Amino acid sequence: MNILVTGATGTVGEPLVRFLQRASSEHRFFFTARRPAIIRHKIDAKTWQIRQFDFEDIYSFKSALKEIDRLFLLRPPNLTDVKGYILPLLKAAKEAEVKLIVFLSIQSADKNKWTPHYKIEKALKESGINYIFLRSGFFMQNFLQEIREDITKRDEVFVPAGSNRFSFIDAEELAEVTADLLLNAPEASQIYTLTGTSPMDYYRVATVASEALGRPIRYTNPNPFWFIFRKMMRGRSLMFAFIQVVLYRFNRVPPADQYRHTLQRLLNRPPKSLSAFFIEHQEELSAQKTIAPTTDKTRD
């Protein structure tokens, strides 16, 4: 069986590559890259395993999908034109006789029709290709990436989530489950909602972080306009900041979807808690007082 992985150097893709290579020597794995020369230094892969592929270059699809049986599909954060790029990709996958596409979606994508994830799920259902939707909670790794600077330099969690509640998942555990499904799942359409923690709002997140990191962390609950302004001042694009606002403020998760035991069942163990994640990454989230604490008084 030949498996093609998109996003192989990303938050989920990088551990997914490791789990796939560790779990099986019977299958052939291929990894996509816009610039293959760069990816060779980031993952343990032979030259022939790396295929040039660009979501925004529909002419790269055919060669990348040649003789592929299963595809792991991860949408780049900046790609919102589903009709222009995802539909041609699915057409190419159909022509290449791809038998199963595992798509990394978001929790309750079917309830949030404004998201690209909803549109991609809809397109996959209409494509005639067998699919697996992984409707994932928020990645814990976000606290080591986009949110990290606010925690380390200002002792705050700065996201425009209001009092909305979210479930969190460790990307490593998500990758572990994804690898198993890519290798062993039957060629039949399935949907999994994957959450690793009980749902909590960001006030509770700040409390958990404070207890785990051993210092007070506060949730400042910025209004969307202040959030967008500060992100743009840090070099982020307006579109990126806007999408962040939409995901935090308007992503509705029905109570029935807020916590499922699916991840625990697939892992055969309890998933990692957010507290354990913060403790595990104490050093990376340690205080770095190079910037004076903010005196925001912003409220909704």
Image (spheres, helix red, strand yellow):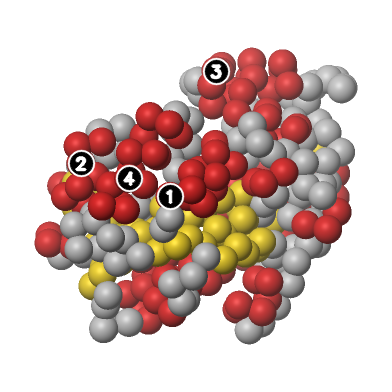
Dot 4 falls on a residue whose secondary structure is helix
The three-letter amino acid code for the residue at tag 2 is Ser
Can you give x and y, in whole percent of width and height, for residue 205 in the image?
79, 50
Dot 2 falls on a residue whose secondary structure is helix
Residue found at x 69% / y 65%: 196
- The residue identified by callout 4 is 91
In space, the residues marked 4 and 2 are separated at their CA atoms by: 13 Å
Side of 186 where 67 appears, left or right: left
In space, the residues marked 4 and 3 are separated at their CA atoms by: 32 Å
- The residue identified by callout 2 is 60
- The residue identified by callout 1 is 127
The three-letter amino acid code for the residue at tag 3 is Leu
Say which label, 1 or 2, has the lower sequence index.
2
Side of 178 where 89 appears, left or right: left
Dot 1 falls on a residue whose secondary structure is helix
Can you give x and y, in whole percent of width and height, for residue 133 in the image?
55, 58
